[in-house]
Amino acid sequence: EPTLLWLRRDLRVADQAALIAAVHDGPVIPVYILDDETPKHRRMGGASRWWLHHSLMSLDKDLRKLGSRLILRRGRADTVLTDLAAETGAKRVHCLHHYEPWWRNAEHAVAKTLDLVCHDGNYLAPPGTVTTGSGAPYKIYTPFWRALSAHMPPPHPVAAPDAIPAPAKWPASDTLADWNLLPTKPDWATGFVKEWTPGEGGAKERLEDFLPHASGYDIGRNLPSDELTSRLSPHLHFGEISPATVWHHVIEAKGDATIYLKEIAWRDYAQNVILQYPDYGRESGRPTLDALEWRTGPDAASDLKAWQQGRTGYPIVDAGMRQLWTTGWMHNRVRMITASFLIKHLLIDWRKGEEWFWDCLVDADYASNSVNWQWTSGTGIDPNMFVRIMAPLTQSVKFDAAGYIREWVPELSGLDDAAIHDPDESGRRPESYPAKIIGHREGRERALAAARRTK
Ligand code: FAD
């Protein structure tokens, strides 16, 4: 009888422990289930759906080269798997572990009716295994990193199988076109197409392009004008490449790669936080800050819109928000600046920003998004404080963002380096570009006053 290979955010054939185990068992039926019911309000956002469409197309091609194919089904994952098992006579399901709370629930449900075997491989170390001496999970990143390092390097990646045995009869499959994953706003995806090649082949190319520049990463990673980061985040999120593969290649190319590896480790850290606090995407890690008087009502709604559309009058913020809308990705330093601006200067609940990123990012990831938003807002379980307020204009100068602003805010492309960070202040603001939505000092004072009132 065939075995089912249940694919989720692990859309690859190399270093795929569940695939290797399934092949070992005999004929394999790889299945991807579009499940909009199990995650409830966490159904995949628009940009992720675009990515998924292309990634599944690429995976089907890769599977066909190995004598297999991808079966597509839609519905509640546990029900679909049970039905598919009954249809095909399969009794066992192999998958990689996923730690989003809805996937953990689904795994429990599947295990009630089928022989579900979950494997590791989407993280450097299986979430939950890096603990203090007394076995407690870490809340703070730095000690987590220290403890994780003791488990490193991760196991060497395993190559894709030479062939995947096919079942005697393939079950029916939906077509991708049935799923309508591509955006209905026709212009939205044009910038995505230019920027990205979803799929395992695209992930490999992205890594190979990055390796020769990896030595510039330590200094360059904070400079949004220089494109020096790896841009592997959507590929890692969808599991088109394993973090162990990235780890070993980067070490080989770069020798001392600590700074880069510490960033990939943030991905592991975030997943460990989610394992401890499954509702972290909605619930603040510091309940005292729930009393904070976030702005609501029509003025706040119009400010939120200005932020989303990149019309705040702060060029670095607007450049970031427009990069996000156009390409589905934003530079990390600018993610911090834009998030902090929404939360502190506009005093809008971090959850509203998290939601927007969830819909717009091609790398939208429940753990990484929630943990980074709560880190920026100072509402999380880490020691970062709400009262630490980033100054967007200073950051823009410090990280030399002039080139980045010229690229994403063309109204300002005529301004020189001295004027471009703060067109209002320099008196050179073109009419087509908005005035500052709120002064820096005014925004800062309002946020600090709100924080004082929670005490
Ligand atoms: P690189 O600098 O090349 O880093 C390599 C890899 O390490 C990344 O691909 C990513 O997988 C991981 N990584 C790096 N920094 C972080 C971090 N701070 N947290 C978690 N993983 C990290 N990252 C996501 O993958 N999904 C998200 O939904 C997400 N939301 C974010 C929201 C906010 C407010 C902030 C401040 C950061 C967020 N990040 C998120 C983290 C980070 O911005 C991106 O991972 C990074 O910009 C991706 O670009 P890169 O692949 O070029 O990164």
Image (spheres, grey):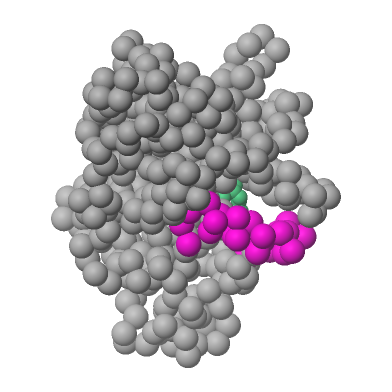
Q: Which residues are magenta?
A: 197-223
Magenta segment includes 376: no
Q: In the rendered view, would you say 266 is above or below 56?
A: above
Choose between 185 and 382: the one closer to the eye.
Answer: 185
Quadrant assignment for the N terminus: top left
Q: Is residue 354 left or right of residue 176?
A: right
Magenta segment's dominant SS is: helix
| Residue positioned 55% across, 40% down in the render | 163
Q: Can you tell which quarter of the image residue 50 is in?
A: bottom left
Where's residue 263, x and y in %?
64, 45
Report the residue at 56% width, 77% height from top: 402
Q: Please determine whether, in this image, residue 153 is positioned above or below residue 90.
A: below
Front residue of 100/57: it is 57
Q: Is residue 344 visible?
A: no
Res 52 seen here: yes
- Who's the residue at 66% across and 36% down the image? 158
Q: Position of residue 143 (x, y in %)?
A: 68, 28
Q: Nearer the viewer, residue 175 or 407?
A: 175
Q: Position of residue 407 (x, y in %)?
A: 48, 78
Q: Is residue 131 above or below residue 426?
A: above
Residue at 28% of width from left, 51% of height from top?
A: 176
- Extreme residue toward the front, this view: 168
Q: Outermost residue, right direction? A: 255
The stretch drawn in magenta includes residue 211: yes
- Counting from the top left corner in percent of width and height, residue 107 is at 38, 20
In the rendered picture of this protein, how many numbered marks are placed on residues? 0
Residue placed farthest to the left in the image? 298
Position of the C terminus, as image quadrant, is top left
